[in-house]
Image (cartoon, grey):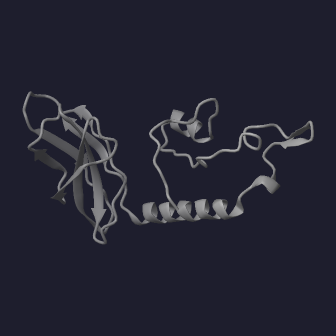
Amino acid sequence: MRVRVIYRRDRYLRGSDHISFLREGWPAGRFTEPNEDFAHQHQDVRLVDGVQYGDLPEFCDFDYITRVALVNGAVLWSLAQAPGTPKGATVVTTNLTNDTTLRWQRGNEPDLAGYEVVWRETTAAEWQRVIPVGDVTEVTVDLSKDNVFFGVRAVDRDGHRSPVAFPRPGS
């Protein structure tokens, strides 16, 4: 199954359940079919001039729904195997330098192997570089905090990686 990440909160003129989670500060995402059938989605069930409208079982693609469920299961399994997202991630902004110091709290997972700093150009949608930094809670990277976006993620002994923590400015 081909999964694409769309960097938008939702589609035009409709919204999904994930928005209420985002408003409360919880991570959330949505799964949608890229080729929606607007006669059978986002419609009240009704019959107009012999045309059936509405989201009814006879219009569901159960093979597609099965594939979505398998992708969801794989994502949940992967997240369950990984260490937790680093807490308290900070990019030090107390002085003007051409390098960047990042700090975070160490996780308490027994199989935690260490951390990786990831970064990307401000115009890039996905992480472009990874810097393994080991089992530390502070690192200084030879890149300006003004020129790229940074993140920190945990890695366990089996190579499972946590979601990335976005550091906040601080000391």
Q: Is residue 24 visible?
A: no
* Left-right relation of 125 to 37: left
Residue 114 x, y percent position in the rendering:
23, 61
- Quadrant where the image shows the C terminus: top left
Residue 136 x, y percent position in the rendering:
17, 55
Identify the residue at horizontal 35%, vertical 52% (top origin).
85
| Quadrant in which residue 122 is drawn | top left
Identify the residue at horizontal 37%, vertical 52% (top origin).
163
Q: Is residue 140 visible?
A: yes
Q: Is residue 106 above or below residue 112?
A: above
Q: Is residue 21 above or below residue 114?
A: above
| Quadrant in which residue 93 is drawn | top left
Query: Which of the pair 17/68 is nearer the observer?
Result: 68
Identify the residue at horizontal 31%, vertical 60% (top origin).
108
Residue 13 x, y percent position in the rendering:
63, 29
* Left-right relation of 90 to 140: right
* Left-right relation of 128 to 53: left
Residue 83 x, y percent position in the rendering:
36, 60
Circle count: 0
Identify the residue at horizontal 16%, vertical 48% (top origin).
138
Q: Residue furthest bottom?
A: 158
Query: Which of the pair 108/82 is nearer the observer?
Result: 82
Query: Which of the pair 10/58 is nearer the observer?
Result: 58
